[in-house]
Amino acid sequence: MKAKLLFCLACVLTLWACAPAARMEAENDLLYYIAEGQAVVAGYLGSGCAAEIPPSLGGAPVMKIASQAFQNTDLQRLGLPAGLARIGSWAFGYCQRLEGIDLPASLTGIGYGAFYACGLTAATLPAGLAELGDWAFAHCEHLRQISLPAGLTRIGDSVFCGCAALSGITLPANLRSIGDHAFGGCLSLTAIELPRGLRSIGSFAFQGCAGLKTVAVPASVAFIDEDAFLDCENVSFMVEPGSYAMRFAQKNGIPYQLTGLRPGDVSGDGQVDIQDVIRLLKLVSGWDVQVLAAGCDVTGDGSINMMDVIRLLKYVSGWDVRLE
């Protein structure tokens, strides 16, 4: 108890130093101050396992939870008010007994390490969330499910690093980048589908995801760090022919399967043209050429021969023929 009081006092002094003009007040076991007409929750003085932040404190609307406000407390549940816009850095860090929290629709920002090493088992991030800070949910070892908003464009560094129980996550359609160590050590992930439009995957992004077996990588991805899938010994890719992801898998010895393969795409570059005809002709003539076998049998008769060459030639010449 003494240690907790000392910790709360340290937090108050830190916040006071950061906002010297603010006057600290207490109400309903909550420390707060008023800044620019808005109430900022700065700390928790209670000893119970549940608490509720009201919509207003001191006559001002509650818009923000300050950095470290509830860090290392024994709260199991906390009610947040409608209208809350931001949760500060480390606000709930090390709240190991915090099992659930309902984030209001008004929330637009979650700061650095806000829920670091919490006891959360599931979370739904609101649709209007625009900022998800680095390390936000890192080392939440009991977190099994999380729902991300469709408009989120970036998953930052180490956001879910060390979430060993995380087994279910759907990445938002507008996601463009995955940061360094973002999902490192997520041992329970077995499959993940990366959204079309994703462009980059950072270093060690999925390092040590020992259970990860299947990753669907869209053709939009233009960069994957060399160590992004380090120590993922069982992983395989689902890739599109000719894509960056296919070349990455080939270079790094990662097994892969092709999706969206076009009949007649003998070379695997995603196109069907005269170069495919030439390569197929070389193949049936006995040359040692590299081909995608699934794109060669354009007649659909179960064999690859000169009839496939003829049909493919007709197709690229504009004849009304079908490739099987």
Image (spheres, rainbow, N blue to C red):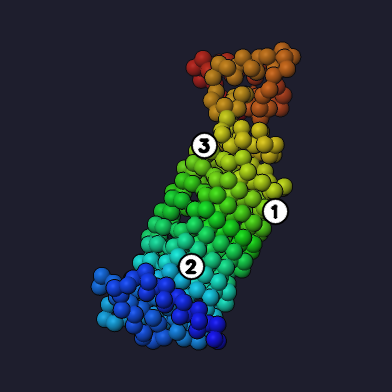
Q: What amino acid is at disc 2? A: Trp
The residue positioned 66% from the left and 27% from the top of the image is 292
Q: Which residue is mark 2?
A: 90
**Gap in angstroms between the C-alphas marked 1 and 2:** 28 Å
The residue positioned 60% from the left and 27% from the top of the image is 268
Q: What amino acid is at disc 1? A: Ala
Front tag of 2 and 3? 2
Q: Position of residue 71 (x, y in %)?
A: 50, 74
**In this rendering, is residue 29 above or below 293?**
below
The residue positioned 53% from the left and 82% from the top of the image is 4
Of the 4 image quadrants, the one containing the N terminus is bottom right
Mark 2 surroundings within 10 Å by alpha-carbon count, few (fewer than 14), some (14 through 19), many (20 or more): many
Mark 3 and mark 1 lie on one chain; the one further toward the N terminus is: 1
Question: Element at badge 3?
Answer: loop
Mark 3 surroundings within 10 Å by alpha-carbon count, few (fewer than 14), some (14 through 19), many (20 or more): some
Identify the mark at residue 210; answer none if there is no mark: 1
Q: Which residue is mark 3?
A: 222
Q: Position of residue 145 (x, y in %)?
A: 56, 64
Residue 174 relative to residue 323: left or right: left
**Gap in angstroms between the C-alphas marked 2 and 3:** 33 Å
Contact, CB < 8 Å: mark 3 with mark 1? Answer: no
- Specify whether residue 169 is in view: no
User: Could you say which is closer to the camera, residue 294 or residue 204?
Assistant: 204
- Specify whether residue 255 is in view: yes
Q: Position of residue 229 (x, y in %)?
A: 64, 46
Residue 172 relative to residue 182: left or right: left
